[in-house]
Amino acid sequence: MQTNDKLTGWIDAHFDEEVAFLQQVIRIPTDTPPGDNAPHADAVAEMVKAFGWSAEKHAVPAQAVHDYGMQSITNLIVRRPYQAGGPTIALNAHGDVVPPGDGWTHPPYGGVIDNGYIYGRAAAVSKCDFATFIFAVRALEALGVPLKGGVELHFTYDEEFGGLLGPGWLLEQKLTKPDLVIAAGFSYNIVTAHNACLQLEITVHGKSGHGAMPETGHDALQAATRILNAIYAELPELKKIKSKVPGIDSPTMLVGRIDGGTNTNVVPGKVVMKMDRRMIPDEDPALVEAQVRALIENAVSGVPGIRVEIKRLLLSHALRPLPGSDKLVASLQKNAKEVIGEEITAQGTPLYADARLYGEQGIAAVLYGAGPRTVPESNAKKADERLALEDLRKATKVVAMTLLDFLAA
């Protein structure tokens, strides 16, 4: 108990420094797209030098990044090895963000503090956990007690595009193989499972024609409308499918972006749509993809002059509990009860995240970090995204105490 008091005391004593660190992390834009994120990684690598740490910079080859639709990715690994004989625990947070959009009352890259909250894009998801994880590890090391095993901080930069060039790339390149992972999450619940996600790009090819003589063309937009109607007609059926995982409800499907046509007075010759199909952990991704492709193709089957091309943008698998995750959950829950003063749940989430990439390699991963009780109350991915500073403080303490549970010699 005394050790935990020292740990939490250190965090309280250095909390102003932690908040200032988070402000710096928020103030460097990482809008994805366009995804020019190497400058942020360079800055974070420089910032951790102040703690006597060295961050390995792992730049993803430029061609792979460009082919992926982004501009630059440098992933960071900070390794903190202790005595032999304990587990290596990786702490993963992502630095890429969706563009801020409109409607902000505080600057999206200001890191402004107002009435106990810090405002900014990724204040809640997940630049906050750069601060949570770094200051939890610093508190652990400041205790001066013998530790065994090690910690790795993984700061990655393409979660918004699917993580394949973030944790996926680090794992594929065999740059890391931790025993356990805590990935960025929320301070009032532990996420042990999450949905899978299929994203497709649908290109409808027709033939342009003069607006005064539409019969000279084949209208790609008219054909695309048939596909849209087929997709949205399927939603009531998806609502009937229910997950057995607490916290996860039903699959969802939507078209998030449409581009096409050349001018107001021209029959559209080409339309491109991007769609998203969330799969509950109970579903088979291969079967779902086959069904969605058939749905799209059947919608325009037999339409004269129309050809459809379907390209998979992303297939992310579901996160499911693996051996070892129960011990992480038990430790986080015990420590959260002590710090927050209430039982926190372990459950699934309809979101999908980078944690699944560790799970695919057989590494037990859970999501836990600074954040609110629910995603909507933090305005995550919306205007005025914010984090209660007390939630940052609490999460840092819980993570530090959990690391101590696993790594105390």
Image (tube, grey):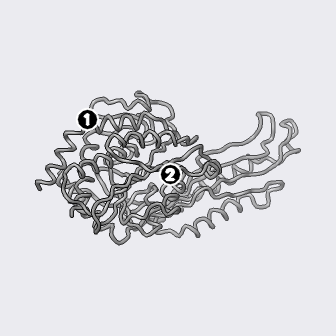
Examine the rendering and report whether any part of residue 238 can be seen: no
Q: Say which residue label 2 marks.
A: 58
Q: In the rendered structure, which disc, 2 or 1, sits on the residue that comes first in sequence?
A: 1
Residue furthest left as drawn: 2
Mark in the foreground, 2 or 1: 2
**As shown in the figure, which amino acid type bears the numbered disc 1?**
Asp
Around disc 1, counting alpha carbons within 10 Å, would you say few (fewer than 14), some (14 to 19), or many (20 or more)? few
Position of the C terminus, as image quadrant, is bottom left
- Please provide percent x and percent y for residue 264: 76, 33
* Residue 49, above or below 360: above
In front here: 142 or 6? 142
In front here: 211 or 375? 375
**As shown in the figure, which amino acid type bears the numbered disc 2?**
His
Task: Report, in whole angstroms, how far the alpha carbon at label 2 lies from the one at label 1.
Answer: 30 Å
SS at mark 1 in the image: helix
Q: Residue at x 83, y 54 (%)?
A: 305
* Residue 216, above or below 408: above
Position of the N terminus, as image quadrant, is bottom left
Q: Residue at x 44, y 50 (%)?
A: 56
Q: Say which residue label 1 marks.
A: 16
Examine the rendering and report whether any part of residue 22 can be seen: yes
Res 289 → quadrant? bottom right
User: Is 382 situated left or right of 198 in this image?
Assistant: left
In front here: 28 or 379? 28
- Please provide percent x and percent y for residue 284: 53, 70
